[in-house]
Amino acid sequence: MALANQKQVEDFADIISECADSIHVRLMKAIKNKEIDQYTAQLIFQDEAMLRQRANSLYIDAVNCIVDGLSQSQKSITELIDTAKGKIKTIKKIAGFIDFIADLLVLAAAAYAAKTAPILAALEEIRKDVEALNKN
C-alpha cells in the first residue's frame, strides 16, 4: 500500500521535489527559446514554488500525511511520478506543460491532506497526461 508510512511519504515528497526541478529546467528552456511570455512564465514559477512548498510540507508533516486504504502500491505511484518527471522536460506545448503542473499540484495537495479519492483521481489525470505524451 502506498503512502502507508513516514518513509513512503518522505520518498513521495522527494519525487515531487524532483518534479519541481524538472519544471524549472523546462521553464528556463521555454524562456530562453521565447516559447512563453513573461506573465505565463511568472505563473509557472509560482506553481513551481507551490509544488516545492507542498513537498516541504509533506516532509515536515509526513506522519500526519499517511494515507489509509490507498489501493495503489508505493512502487506504482513512484514509477508514475518518476515517468512524469522525465516527461516534463520534453513537453513541447506550453498548454500541456501548464496542465501537467496543475495535475502534480493537485496530487501533492491530496497527498498532504491524506485523502484517498483525490489522490487516486490526481494519479489518473497524471497517467492520462503521460499516455498522451507517449503518443506525441
Image (cartoon, rainbow, N blue to C red):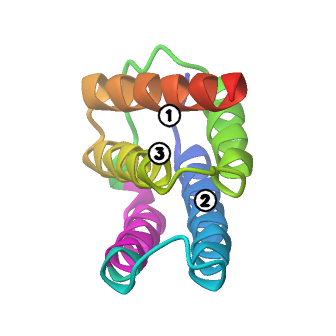
Are the residues tagged 1 and 2 within 8 Å (C-beta)? no
Are the residues tagged 3 and 2 within 8 Å (C-beta)? no
Numbered tag placed on residue 19 in the rendering: 2
Magenta segment, prevailing SS (helix, strand or loop): helix
Which circle's residue, 1 or 2, is located before the other in the chain? 1
Indicate the amino acid at tag 1: Ala
Badge 1 is on which residue?
Answer: 4
- Does the magenta portion include 51? yes
Q: Secondary structure at mark 2?
A: helix
User: Could you tell me how many numbered marks the image carries?
Assistant: 3
Is residue 66 among the parts visible in the rendering? yes
Please, is residue 75 above or below residue 49 in the view? above
Residue at (40, 41) in percent of width and height:
66
Residue at (33, 24) in percent of width and height:
121
Q: Position of residue 12 (x, y in %)?
A: 57, 49
- Per the model, the C-alpha gap separating discs 3 and 2 is 15 Å
Q: Quadrant of residue 30?
A: bottom right
Indicate the amino acid at tag 2: Cys
Q: Nearer the viewer, mark 1 or mark 2?
A: 2
Q: Secondary structure at mark 3?
A: helix
Q: Which residues are magenta?
A: 43-63
Indicate the amino acid at tag 3: Gly
Q: Position of residue 76 (x, y in %)?
A: 66, 24
Badge 3 is on which residue?
Answer: 96
Q: For mark 2, does the 10 Å Cα neighbourhood hold few (<14), some (14 to 19), or many (20 or more) residues?
A: many
Residue at (41, 28) in percent of width and height:
125
Q: Position of residue 37 (x, y in %)?
A: 40, 79
Along the line of sight, the residue nearer the viewer: 89 or 93: 93
Q: For mark 1, does the 10 Å Cα neighbourhood hold few (<14), some (14 to 19), or many (20 or more) residues?
A: some
